[in-house]
Amino acid sequence: MKHSLLEILACPYCRGPLGLKVFSMRGKEVEDGILLCVGCKNAFPIIACIPRMLPALMINPQTLKTFLQKHAGKIPDNFMNNGPEDFGKLKKKTSKSFGFQWNVFSTMFGEYEDNFLRYISPLSKTFFRKKLVLDAGCGFGRHTYYAAKYGAEVVGFDLSDAVEAAYRNCGRMPNVHIVQGDIYSLPFRKVFDFTMSIGVIHHLPDPKKGFLSLAGNMKKNSRILVWIYGKEGRTFKTVILEGTIRRATVRMPQKLLYYFCYIPAGVYHFSNGLYNFFSRFKSTTGLAKKLPFKNYARFPFRVKLADAYDFLGTPVNNYYTREDCEEWAAVSGLRDTSVVSLGGRSWKIFGKK
């Protein structure tokens, strides 16, 4: 953890300031330590340079066990009692799923940059210069990386063990911080110039609550972007796959599901091969445009495998209409809000505080 992060963090329970107790350093970063709330006295560990702003029972058991053994005698007595006792089965299952997914599929591909720019449009690269940005639900850090590359100081934030992959991918960048925590109990002061959450909210047990939590943590004159699944244009997924195959795949052991996903990923890849071939000739471009899954054509096979796992393994997917998004924006207290379609299959919610 970089020392400057202390000016951004707050206790997720009482919003109070935090004190820092350092156990070990890795270069200029705090490798292991404890963050102590000045107000409610709750304690949160820093493990492998990442602040774990969660109840102790939500931290990976092996990670926590190693930390406690390594620093026996230095840990506050109340450490294991912090936070709520019941964190929710669905939230735990979702955290476990994404922790596995983004540590397996953690490779950064160059194609992700155009993907990121498409998500944030009409914002551009120059928008990020000298801004403090929160990437809520950062996964393995691909959006965090590009926001930082464009000149922002970025906090990548995730509930799951995906933070380990995010730290490997971009945590050592001088303008990046990685934090583990809960979107419903944000461990941050209201300091961010821009909050973004891309592909996250729709997987939460209560997506609207997650959106309102992010909106409620914004400072005056700051901006937000949230991207979520749309109901429109997703009939095959929302009606057929959600009601059939996903009922089985969400119950599969993670490693078995990983290998099972080679089947749909292979279908994507084969279709993309046909698309790329037919697109080369004027006489067959019309046929190419009729092929399914062409939005994956520019991506490596590994990305298709990751997306297959994401859809088939994530415990819950929620889908929303434009009216749903507009209702969220209306009750959030944001101003200058807009709901923009992305490809006719998803929504981008923009707003200002």
Image (cartoon, rainbow, N blue to C red):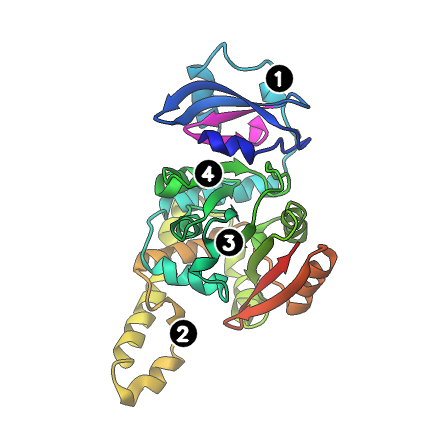
Q: Earlier in the sequence, mark 2 or mark 1?
A: 1
Secondary structure under tag 2 reads loop
Q: Quadrant of residue 334?
A: bottom right
Secondary structure under tag 1 reads loop
Q: Position of residue 64 (x, y in %)?
A: 48, 24
Q: Earlier in the sequence, mark 4 or mark 2?
A: 4
**Disc 3 vs disc 1: Cβ atoms closer than 8 Å?**
no
Q: Earlier in the sequence, mark 3 or mark 1?
A: 1
Q: Residue at x 52, y 66 (%)?
A: 237
Residue found at the far front of this picture: 130
**Disc 2 vs disc 1: Cβ atoms closer than 8 Å?**
no
For marks 3 and 2, give the CA distance.
24 Å
Residue designated by label 3: 248
Residue designated by label 1: 78
Label 1 neighbour load within 10 Å: few <14, some 14-19, many 20+:
few
Q: Residue at x 51, y 42 (%)?
A: 158
Q: Is residue 264 above or below residue 78?
A: below
What amino acid does circle 2 point to?
Pro
4 vs 2, front mark:
4
Secondary structure under tag 4 reads strand
Q: Position of residue 125 (x, y in %)?
A: 43, 59
Q: Residue at x 45, y 52 (%)?
A: 129
* Span of residues in magenta: 43-59
- Specify whether residue 304 is in view: no
The label on residue 292 is: 2
